[in-house]
Image (cartoon, helix red, strand yellow):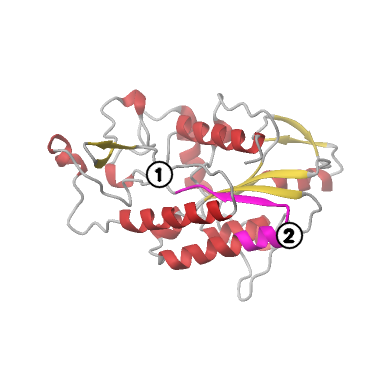
Amino acid sequence: MASNMSEADKNSYEQEKKYRQANCPVCTRIKVRGQKTVRHHHTSSEYVRELAALNGQKTFFCILCKKPEPVEFTEPRRKLILTSSTLYGVWNALELNLPFHIDIETIVGGKVRDATRALKNFLGKPEKLDVKVVCGLNNIGEGQHINDTIDEMMELKAYIMEHNADNTVSFATLLLPPKFCSLYVPPANKAQWDPPADFINRVRDIECLNAAIKAINRGSNRAFVNLHGFGVRSDDGLKMHLHETNPRCRVWRENIVRRKLHLTMSNKVKVMNRIAKYFEHNC
């Protein structure tokens, strides 16, 4: 683990590593044929709410709002984020200050189909849903064909809209992390940033999937969070990664180029603030 990580990044990294294969009580109760136990690290604000209610408590401590919230949800709509480790641990950031309550389901290593299973915890509830999905990179890492990932996204969208036709959903575009993507490398950075001979460059897959995500969002007339610009710049028409010559401007949590996958905590907060803005304007 890098010594120059922020404290919040260090905590997030250690928690992801420690609980990656934990039994998940949230998802195990959603029965899937042939599967008895689901093992992954899943942080669910709704599960904390439910446990508090079962214990007879009137409030629970919301990890995102960082204050007590009533266990009985009384608003007509829920604001919900379904995500993987892309936003994991953002609640540890001291600078996070949301203007209203947001529910979050975060599955470390989660694919889109895992987000769909987490969503099912909300489908029996009466409130309408406004959902932001920040997920899909683990489908790329699995080597899944992009058509199959699109199918998973469409299935997730269908569940949301079948629950209530007034629900809304949008998908964030995917990051272009150096772990999966090699872009143009200037001569000065070749020693560190040129990929090894056996590197499988997924940039075309992610760009094709991002084009499909934009089309899905436009079809629903929803604004969406653009993540594909994080850590990337264009110079004379050549797309390249920011090569992070200034440590104070880090984009990725990891130091080693071909492990760079997760945003730093400060960038996760930027993503959360953008999502909150879209929720605020119902777009």
Mark 1 and mark 2 lie on one chain; the one further toward the N terminus is 2
Q: Are marks 1 and 2 in contact (CB under 8 Å)?
A: no
Quarter containing the N terminus: top left
Q: Given the current orientation, which residue lies at the most extreme left position?
A: 187
Q: Specify the label residue 163 is tagged with.
A: 2
Q: Where in the figure is residue 187, as x and y percent of width and height? A: 12, 38
The answer to whether residue 169 is magenta is yes
- Is any part of residue 71 visible from this angle? yes
Quick check: 169 above or below 117? above
Give amino acid for label 2.
Answer: His
- Which residue corresponds to the image point at 81% horizontal and 40% vertical from the top-left? 75
- Which residue corresponds to the image point at 67% horizontal and 39% vertical from the top-left? 102
Question: In the rendered image, which residue does mark 1 sit on?
Answer: 228
| Towards the viewer: 219 or 247 | 219
Q: Secondary structure at mark 1?
A: loop
| Towards the viewer: 65 or 61 | 65
| Towards the viewer: 102 or 50 | 102
In this picture, which residue range is highlighted in magenta? Answer: 157-173
- Which residue corresponds to the image point at 85% horizontal and 37% vertical from the top-left? 58
Quick check: 160 above or below 274? below
Q: Where in the figure is residue 132, as x and y percent of width and height? A: 59, 47
- Is any part of residue 63 visible from this angle? no
Q: Where in the figure is residue 5, as x and y percent of width and height? A: 40, 30
- The image quarter in which residue 209 lies: bottom left
- From the viewer's perspective, tell me whether residue 207 is left or right of residue 182: right
